[in-house]
Amino acid sequence: MGEKEKMPDKKENDRPVLAFAPIGVIRSPFRDLRDMPIQPAGAAGVRGEVIVDPPYQEGLRDLDGFSHLFLLYLFHRVERWKPLVVPFLDSQPRGIFATRAPVRPNPIGLSVVELLKVEDNVLVVQNVDILDGTPLLDIKPYFPDFDHYATKKNGWLESRKGHVKNRRSDGRF
């Protein structure tokens, strides 16, 4: 493995390595990395649960007033990062930061899900494209006034509009 591909385990480039502790776990019907939806748009109607650890339950107050949430989570099955990847919707190598591939230097995932209900420390959600047992790092409400922008350009993905709904993971990451 090349020097670029090592996951940092101590100070690198004079920056400290940060540590985060999961606040819960995401449950979904996807127990294998193969044949998963590759984005929430391809997981329409797929239900799951976000189980928040009891010390954080009080932080869920007022969340039931939102229809959609950002879930930030750890790609816990990633072993090393890759600077170039062939993304699911393409056949050419692309820079990791121009994709949503999970093999990132900091393997943090982001999905927008629909919140159906809050039951104690459990969020029932749908449009889940996340592997069962994924560690949850954070939850944020989706708010269109803050989070919705009309884009002007969409890079190499411009010609792939509408293709994500039928694509599934093939195990390449």
Image (tube, rainbow, N blue to C red):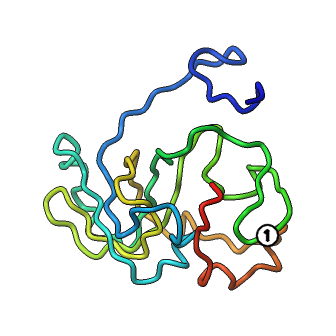
Left or right for 157, reference 60: right
Query: In what quadrant of the picture does the C terminus appear?
Result: bottom right
Q: Quadrant of residue 64?
A: bottom left
Q: Position of residue 153 (x, y in %)?
A: 82, 70
Q: Which residue lies at the image location 31% right of the left edge and 43% below the top edge?
A: 23
Quick one: 27 or 64, which is closer to the camera? 27
Q: Which residue lies at the image location 60% right of the left edge and 52% below the top edge?
A: 102
Dot 1 crowding, Cα within 10 Å, few <14, some 14–19, many 20+: few
Left or right for 87, reference 22: right
- Please state the total of marks drawn on the protein image: 1
Q: Which residue lies at the image location 43% right of the left edge and 60% below the top edge?
A: 131
Query: In what quadrant of the picture does the N terminus appear?
Result: top right
Above or below 172: residue 113: below
Q: Position of residue 80 (x, y in %)?
A: 63, 38
Q: Quadrant of residue 8?
A: top right
Above or below 29: residue 140: above
Q: Position of residue 108 (x, y in %)?
A: 54, 46
Above or below 158: residue 130: above
Left or right for 155, reference 21: right
Q: Position of residue 93 (x, y in %)?
A: 84, 57
Quick one: 79 or 25, which is closer to the camera? 79
Residue furthest left as drawn: 120
Q: Which residue is mark 1?
A: 90
Question: As shown in the figure, which amino acid type bears the numbered disc 1?
Answer: Asp
Q: Secondary structure at mark 1?
A: loop
